[in-house]
């Protein structure tokens, strides 16, 4: 197995618990609860994780050291253990290959729809699969991981290479996602590989590794886009791409500044092509920019060239901004590198959800 976790200093109990489990690079089960994050709960929180793992292990007849924990919900509250005890027992009793979609539904908090996906591909003449379920709608701007996402595959691959592949995939997908610029205490991405496809084990970076990584990238990007589209209160999914930057890091920094700009996000909600807000966000980062080479597009329609406004068809752009998926593109004119950040618009509903979240 492999995993990436939030880098938030105040990690929740399930993160601390699971970080110890993955040192052995093997796991057989993941138990997830929604509603309570089990964060900032001290020793009691860790004790509850131990009990969750023990109950799961008993129900599945496996070792408790093979059980991972993930929690999502309100911070600072203790887990309702009587509910969890009966829920874990029921879940263990009703395991089924058909229940993946039910699991994707069960782990939601403020999400409006489940996120799940499976991809099939050929590897060394073997039919292989990767499946994923994810949740996350707010409090998302990762640094190593994001929300909760569970990936499973039947590919045979060494634990070290699985970890490397997961890092690579996360860094160009989940780590390029921001809903509101906030980092959670509970973010985690798990990937389990059981080797049942029968392929020769991947233990070095070769063509087989590249095929597996391509499939992993595809499913992680699919989940990232679904998470962006279902941001709290969102009506539109936004991709912000910065090209012709001096470095990839600068491209990502500039794109993230635009994606996190409340002014940009509200402009998209209002279907207003206010490209001045994009330029202001990029300029605030301090990245290298050629003002005389700065170009901006909204929905593939140019609105600024060489740092100045250009005429555009107002009706055509208005119509483009009414769509659910919106692209913002900025070219900095200082190099050849690029990066894309995924986000959503900012609406009145986001305020309602978060003003009433605890109550």
Image (tube, rainbow, N blue to C red):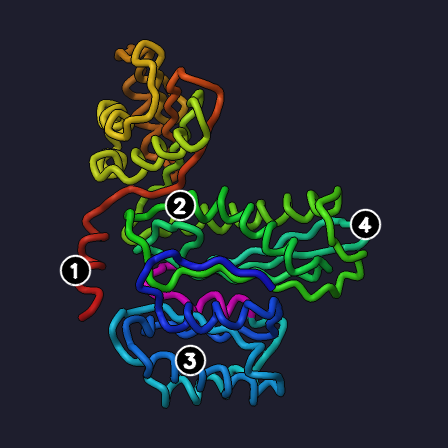
Tell me the residue that label 1 is attached to.
Answer: 355
Secondary structure, mark 1, is: helix
Q: Which residue is drawn at 56% across and 55% down?
A: 117
The segment highlighted magenta reads 100-113
Q: Which of marks 1 and 2 is nearer the N terminus?
A: 2
Above or below, comparing residue 101 to residue 179 in the picture = below
Classify 10 Å Cα crowding around label 2: few (below 14), some (14-19), many (20 and above): many
Question: Is residue 104 highlighted in magenta?
Answer: yes
Tell me the residue that label 4 is attached to.
Answer: 124
Tell me the residue that label 2 is attached to.
Answer: 177
Tell me if I can see residue 250 in this picture. yes
Q: Are marks 4 and 3 in contact (CB under 8 Å)?
A: no
Would residue 95 be found to the left or right of residue 340 on screen? right
Is 319 in front, or is 171? 171
Q: Which residue is drawn at 18% across and 53% down?
A: 351
Q: In which quarter of the image is residue 270?
A: top left
Q: Which of marks 1 and 3 is nearer the N terminus?
A: 3
Classify 10 Å Cα crowding around label 4: few (below 14), some (14-19), many (20 and above): few
Kindly report which numbered mark, 4 or 3, lies closer to the viewer in this rendering.
3
Alpha carbon separation for disc pair 3 and 2: 28 Å
Tell me the residue that label 3 is attached to.
Answer: 49
Q: Which of marks 4 and 3 is nearer the N terminus?
A: 3
Alpha carbon separation for disc pair 1 and 4: 52 Å
């Amino acid at each position: 197995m492999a995993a990436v976790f939030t880098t938030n200093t105040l990690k929740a109990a399930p993160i601390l618990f699971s970080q110890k489990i993955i040192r052995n690079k093997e796991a057989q089960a993941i138990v997830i609860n929604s509603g309570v994050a089990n964060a900032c709960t001290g020793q009691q929180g860790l004790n509850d994780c131990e009990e969750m793992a023990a109950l799961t292990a008993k129900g599945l007849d496996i070792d408790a050291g093979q059980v991972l924990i993930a929690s999502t919900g309100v911070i600072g509250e203790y887990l309702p253990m009587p509910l969890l005890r009966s829920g874990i027992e029921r879940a263990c009793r009703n395991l089924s290959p058909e229940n993946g979609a039910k699991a994707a539904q069960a782990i939601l908090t403020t999400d409006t729809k489940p996120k799940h996906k499976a991809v099939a591909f050929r590897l060394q003449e073997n039919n292989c699969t990767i499946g994923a379920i994810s949740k996350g709608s707010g409090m998302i701007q990762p640094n190593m991981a994001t929300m909760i996402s569970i990936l499973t595959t039947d590919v045979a691959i060494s634990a070290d290479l699985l970890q490397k592949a997961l890092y690579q995939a996360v860094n160009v997908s989940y780590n390029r996602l921001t809903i509101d610029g906030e980092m959670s205490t509970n973010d985690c991405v798990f990937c389990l590989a059981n080797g049942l496809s029968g392929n020769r084990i991947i233990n070095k970076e070769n063509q087989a590794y590249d095929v597996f990584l391509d499939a992993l990238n595809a499913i992680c990007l699919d989940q990232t886009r679904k998470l962006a589209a279902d941001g709290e209160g969102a009506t539109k999914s936004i991709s912000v791409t910065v090209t012709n930057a001096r470095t990839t890091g600068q491209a990502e920094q500039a794109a993230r500044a635009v994606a996190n700009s409340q002014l940009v996000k509200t402009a998209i909600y209002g279907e207003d092509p206010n490209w001045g807000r994009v330029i202001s966000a990029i300029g605030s980062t301090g990245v290298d920019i050629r003002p005389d080479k700065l170009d901006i597009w909204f929905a593939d329609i140019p609105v600024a060239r060489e740092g100045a406004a250009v005429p555009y068809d107002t009706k055509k752009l208005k119509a483009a901004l009414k769509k659910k998926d919106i692209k913002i593109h900025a070219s900095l004119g200082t190099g050849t590198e690029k990066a894309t950040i995924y986000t959503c618009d900012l609406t009145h509903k986001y305020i309602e959800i978060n003003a009433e979240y605890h109550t």
